[in-house]
Amino acid sequence: MNPINPRWALLAACMMHAGGYFSVKSSEFRHHNPGGLRQNSKDEVLVKFDTVQDGFNMLAYEIMKFNGTPVDKFLMRYAPDDEYSSIYIDTVLTMAGMTTEEMI
């Protein structure tokens, strides 16, 4: 696999943290899936990865696919589907040192 762009890796790490990956009781933790990635947007079941690194690399790859997209629009895809979505987006942006106008 090609080296991961450091900017995408930073965004992935911030998403991992803000999304609660480090809670050992989370489904994301048990499935080595720091991005909470699913097969498709309608799928309720998380993809299970062999290692955390595999899951992290896939999240970075997902970010790469949206290169040139406003970062807040991308994060809306992964934000919780509730009243906490803006908190998640603001948290990731603050941790990454990014603004809503920046492009991935």
Image (cartoon, helix red, strand yellow):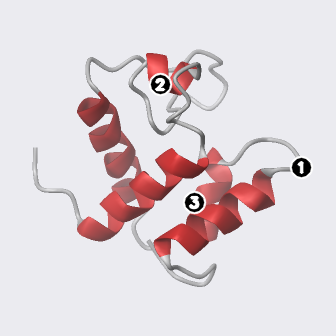
Measure the alpha-carbon separation of dots 1 and 2: 23 Å
Q: Work out whether mark 1 precedes mark 3 in sequence or the reverse, and give the earlier one.
A: 3
Where residue 29 is drawn, which disc sits there?
A: 2
**50 left or right of 92 in image:** left
Position of 61 relative to 52 (above/below) = below
Quarter of the rendering occupied by the N terminus:
top left
1 vs 3, front mark: 1
Instruction: Classify residue 88 as left or right of residue 51.
Output: right
Residue annotated with mark 3: 74
Label 1 with label 2: CB-CB less than 8 Å: no
Q: Circle 1 — which element?
A: loop
- Residue 54 seen in render: yes
Of 21 and 45, which appears nearest the observer? 21
Residue at point 33% right, 40% down? 56
Q: CA distance from mark 1 to mark 3?
A: 18 Å
Please report the residue visible at 44 percent of the width from the left and 71 percent of the height from the top.
104
Q: Which circle, 1 or 2, is nearer the viewer?
A: 2
| N-term-proximal mark, 1 vs 2 | 2
